[in-house]
């Protein structure tokens, strides 16, 4: 089932169920309240009857005046429980015969017309008589149905007081349901009115459900179309939405996803172009020198062979670096972690680089803490990390410069700073130094410089050790590399 139909049915069914429950509760509440109103109204009508019963008991001193004379009880029922309002009489209201004179009855055998049912109160008297009883002070039934009991909650006992003392009770059986007539007609009218209102609300809910479902599903269909186009490679496609809700957030997230995919595609294309360019240079040099040797332009001697060997080593290093970088990116680079002393590793790598540094008249200084500092790491990868940093500093520092290495503890990390002398880099170049194949062309070339992979590999090694690395300007005039590695205690 389509989402818009699911939303429509869900909204309509939930609204319909709520309205049905409200209708049922309203009917129950109205009947209960209306019955309570009718019972209280009947009880209030019995107040004059209680007063007359009290006066009669005060005159006779007992209830025999009613027990021995049941017609008197019936007359009281007729007078108070069964009476109906009489039309007003007076000058302003002349007798009905004066308003609508009728001829006298003909002397024939025709029976008189029946009296209207509404004027005969015998049915009402019988109904009330079944609801009223007279009891003494101990609630013993004197007159009326004997099944009434003071222990049942639907029975109301109204005290009959004579000079402040209870001499009897008038028992009243409350209504438990609408008996019919006008009361039931009124109740049915109210129920019918609410049913019509509920039906109108359900129809209105259906209309609102259609509108709301369309408003919710419309943007989702737009997002679905955009995702379909992006999945087909249209990474430049964007969703334009001014919504401030979750659907708007989803649209913005999909736009960011498309932008990231577009950037990754561009980076991959640039990566392939740069790799092919980097590999083509040493291959072209090798090919040119070999062709020159074949043609006899370059003599085949120790010098020419050493040049070929140098280019082949450069090509091998480039391929190995690319392989390591690719393995690191896909998470396939193998690491053997163990507790290692970073101070001794850095000192050993600096000692190994001393000949290269001396050849360029560059001094390498280490600010050691005087005690071992351990971290969990892979020895081979950490040695590769510090070799890359040393080669980068020595290669791009002017002769006579200095490389300063600092090692210290910061809370739960080992903080390593790697600073070299001029030349430096610009602010715009700092964030790009760790990008693959990036070189600051002003001071680097492929003959004396690297391929732009050293810092990219260094960053991946640091991140594989749960560390952080960033670049900034050095106080010595060159570049400063800051590294944080977890401290192992």
Image: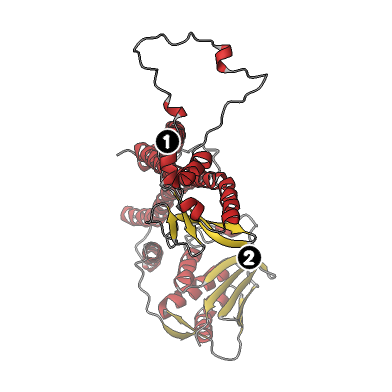
* Closest to the observer, 385 or 98: 98
Location of mark 1 (residue)? 122
Q: Is residue 222 above or below residue 163?
A: above
- Where in the figure is residue 387, as x and y percent of width and height? 49, 74
CA neighbours of label 1 inside 10 A, class few (<14), some (14 to 19), many (20+): few
Q: Is residue 61 above or below residue 403?
A: above
Residue 122 pos. (x, y %): 42, 35
| Residue at figure coordinates x 44%, y 86% from the top left | 339
Proximity of marks 1 and 2: CB atoms separated by less than 8 Å: no
Residue 240 versus residue 107: which sits nearer the camera? 107
Residue 238 lies, in percent from the top left, at 48, 38
Residue at the spot x=55%, y=14% of the render? 97
Disc 1 or 2, which lies upstream in sequence? 1
- Residue 472, disc: 2
Q: Is residue 364 above or below residue 272?
A: below
Name the element at disc 2. strand
Q: Residue furthest toward the bottom?
A: 371
Left or right: 92, with 178 as reference point: right
- Is residue 235 visible in the rendered image? The answer is no
Secondary structure at numbered mark 1: helix
In front of the other: 38 or 341: 38
Q: Could you tell whether 405 is left or right of 273 in the image? A: right
Which of the two discs, 1 and 2, sits closer to the camera? 1
- Pointer 2: residues within 10 angstroms few (<14), some, or many (20+)? some
Gap between marks 1 and 2, in whole Å? 109 Å
Residue 244, image x and y in percent? 56, 43
């Amino acid at each position: 089932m389509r989402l818009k139909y699911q939303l429509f049915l869900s909204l309509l069914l939930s609204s319909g169920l709520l309205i049905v429950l409200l209708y049922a509760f309203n009917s129950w509440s109205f009947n209960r309240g209306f019955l309570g109103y009718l019972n209280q109204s009947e009880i209030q009508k019995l107040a004059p009857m209680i007063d007359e019963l009290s006066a009669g008991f005060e005159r006779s001193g007992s209830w025999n005046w009613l027990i021995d004379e049941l017609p008197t009880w019936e007359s009281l029922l007729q007078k108070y429980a069964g009476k109906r309002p009489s039309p007003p009489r007076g000058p302003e209201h002349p007798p009905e015969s004066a308003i609508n004179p009728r001829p006298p009855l003909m002397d024939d055998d025709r029976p008189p017309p029946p009296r209207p049912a509404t004027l005969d109160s015998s049915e009402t008297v019988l109904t009330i008589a079944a609801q009223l009883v007279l009891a003494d002070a101990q609630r013993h039934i004197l007159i009326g149905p004997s099944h009434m009991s003071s222990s049942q909650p639907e029975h109301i006992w109204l005290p009959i007081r004579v000079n402040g003392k209870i001499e009897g009770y008038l028992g009243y059986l409350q209504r438990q349901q609408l008996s019919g007539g006008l009361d039931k007609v009124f109740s049915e009218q109210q129920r019918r009115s609410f049913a019509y209102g509920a039906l109108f609300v359900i129809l209105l809910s259906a209309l609102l459900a259609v509108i709301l479902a369309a408003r919710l599903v419309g943007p989702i269909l737009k997002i679905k179309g955009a995702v379909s186009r992006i999945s087909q490679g249209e990474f430049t496609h964007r969703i334009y939405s001014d919504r401030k809700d979750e659907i708007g957030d989803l649209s913005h997230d999909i736009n960011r996803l498309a932008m990231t995919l577009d950037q990754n595609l561009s980076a991959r294309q640039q990566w392939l172009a740069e790799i092919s360019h980097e590999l083509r240079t040493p291959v072209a040099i090798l090919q040119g020198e070999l062709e020159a040797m074949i043609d006899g332009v370059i003599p085949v001697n120790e010098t020419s062979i050493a040049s070929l060997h140098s280019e082949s080593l450069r090509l091998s290093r480039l391929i190995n670096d690319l392989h390591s970088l690719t393995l690191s990116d896909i998470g396939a680079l193998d690491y053997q972690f163990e507790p290692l002393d970073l101070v001794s590793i850095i000192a050993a790598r600096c000692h190994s680089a001393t000949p290269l540094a001396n050849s360029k008249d560059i001094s390498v200084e280490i600010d050691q803490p005087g005690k071992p500092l351990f971290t969990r790491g892979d020895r081979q990868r950490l040695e590769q990390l510090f070799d890359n940093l040393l080669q980068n500093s020595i290669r791009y520092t002017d002769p006579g410069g200095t490389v300063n290495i600092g090692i210290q503890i910061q809370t739960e990390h080992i903080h390593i700073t790697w600073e070299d002398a001029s030349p430096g880099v610009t602010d715009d170049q700092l964030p790009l130094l760790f990008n693959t194949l990036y070189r600051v062309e002003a001071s680097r070339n492929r003959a004396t410089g690297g391929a732009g992979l050293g810092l990219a590999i260094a960053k991946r090694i640091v991140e594989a050790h749960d560390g952080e690395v960033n670049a900034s300007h050095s106080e010595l005039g060159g570049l400063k590399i800051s590294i944080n590695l977890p401290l192992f205690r």
